[in-house]
Image (tube, rainbow, N blue to C red):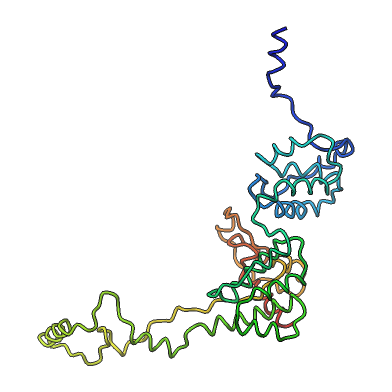
């Protein structure tokens, strides 16, 4: 009798839980011939909505039914997330929509994502924040807020602007759509950026008055010693600059290049490349090198290179910018 009680208290480690699917889903075998998904595993610390979007994008081209998506979804989970899945009550999930809702209800609290349209109104432009940075920050948060439309985003962005000339234009103009508002914000942000940079005259004046660190320009004693030294050695100061540099030498090259400013998009450059491939010219061919075979973890679909990602491709961004300006 005691042996039976002791045996009943020992956990059966070899017994696996069946999972939450109903018999209708478990009898389907659509996932047998599907190749493993090339998306990161979910471990409970990533953004759950981003993981769902990645999963649905990966299975979208495989033609799976609702039952097939249910059976394939657990293969995208690992560690604590997979343990959570098998702790769900058996027979409680009968569709992929139900599985998505259960997944989001459990893990959405662990993300820093904005939840509702009201959260967008909390994004305010700081006093020292340029328009370009504020618009990029707002656009990023808007893309992470699933239950918000363009009309609400338009009003939230307008209310979050600090007092400025652009804020006056927004309230006095007839811009009606969020896309038009963001397009005008990109134009004014570009002008604001270049107007904030010092002009050639200002740079020249600054270069003539700037002193080197560690040098005391008001030290008459030091200047006198230098004059005596030059007099003893017969060196003339004619043709020499303020710090001993010959004035007839060519000036140093100016390496301060203006940064590229691009229009904020509501989608990714990879999607633009897929949809507008007829209008985007093909990249110039180049000779393959040894670096093409390295595993860099990056890949750009435009020039088919592994030195950078598609979203960071400057050549593709310039082409898309030209297409936007041409209408």
Determine the residue located farthest toward the right in the rendered image: 24
Quadrant of the rendering where the C terminus is positioned: bottom right
Residue at 77 percent of width and 61 percent of height: 147
**Number of residue marks:** 0
The part of the image, by quadrant, that contains residue 53 is bottom right
Quadrant of the rendering where the N terminus is positioned: top right
Residue 51: % across, % down: 71, 51
- Name above or below for residue 162 compared with residue 297: below
* Relative horizontal placement of residue 239, taking residue 183 as reference (left or right): left
* Relative horizontal placement of residue 243, taking residue 268 as reference (left or right): left
Determine the residue located farthest toward the top in the rendered image: 1
Give whichever of 97, 302 is nearer the camera: 97
* Relative horizontal placement of residue 222, taking residue 48 as reference (left or right): left
- Name above or below for residue 322 compared with residue 103: below
Residue at 47 percent of width and 87 percent of height: 199
- Name above or below for residue 242 compared with residue 57: below
Residue 113: % across, % down: 67, 57
Residue 179: % across, % down: 74, 75
Residue at 28 percent of width and 84 percent of height: 245
Residue 285: % across, % down: 64, 69
Determine the residue located farthest toward the bottom in the rendered image: 238
């Amino acid at each position: 009798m005691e042996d039976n009680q002791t045996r009943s208290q020992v956990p059966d480690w070899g017994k696996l839980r069946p999972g939450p699917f109903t018999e209708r889903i478990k009898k389907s075998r659509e996932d047998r011939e599907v190749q493993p998904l090339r998306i990161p595993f979910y471990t409970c610390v990533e953004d759950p909505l981003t993981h769902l979007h990645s999963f649905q994008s990966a299975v979208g081209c495989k033609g799976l039914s609702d039952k097939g998506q249910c059976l394939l979804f657990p293969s995208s989970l690992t560690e604590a997330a997979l343990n959570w899945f098998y702790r769900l009550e058996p027979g409680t999930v009968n569709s992929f929509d139900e599985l998505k809702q259960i997944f989001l209800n459990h893990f959405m609290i662990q993300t820093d994502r904005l939840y509702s349209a009201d959260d967008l109104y909390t994004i305010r432009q700081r006093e020292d924040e340029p328009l370009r940075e504020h618009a990029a920050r707002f656009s990023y948060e808007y893309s992470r807020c699933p239950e918000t439309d363009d009309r609400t985003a338009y009003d939230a962005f307008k209310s979050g602007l600090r007092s400025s000339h652009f804020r006056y234009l927004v309230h006095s103009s007839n811009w009606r759509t969020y896309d038009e508002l963001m397009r005008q914000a990109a134009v004014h942000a570009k002008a604001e950026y270049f107007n904030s940079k010092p002009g050639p005259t200002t740079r020249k004046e600054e270069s003539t008055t700037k002193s080197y660190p560690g040098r005391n320009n008001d030290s008459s004693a030091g200047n006198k010693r230098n004059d005596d030294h030059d007099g003893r050695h017969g060196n003339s100061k004619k043709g020499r600059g303020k710090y001993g540099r010959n004035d007839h030498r060519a000036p140093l090259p100016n390496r301060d290049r203006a940064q590229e400013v691009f229009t904020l998009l509501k989608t990714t450059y990879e999607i633009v490349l897929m949809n507008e491939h007829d209008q985007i010219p093909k990249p110039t061919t180049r000779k393959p090198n040894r670096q093409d075979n390295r595993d860099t973890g990056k890949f750009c679909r435009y020039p088919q290179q592994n030195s950078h990602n598609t979203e960071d491709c400057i050549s593709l961004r310039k082409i898309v910018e030209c297409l936007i300006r041409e209408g």
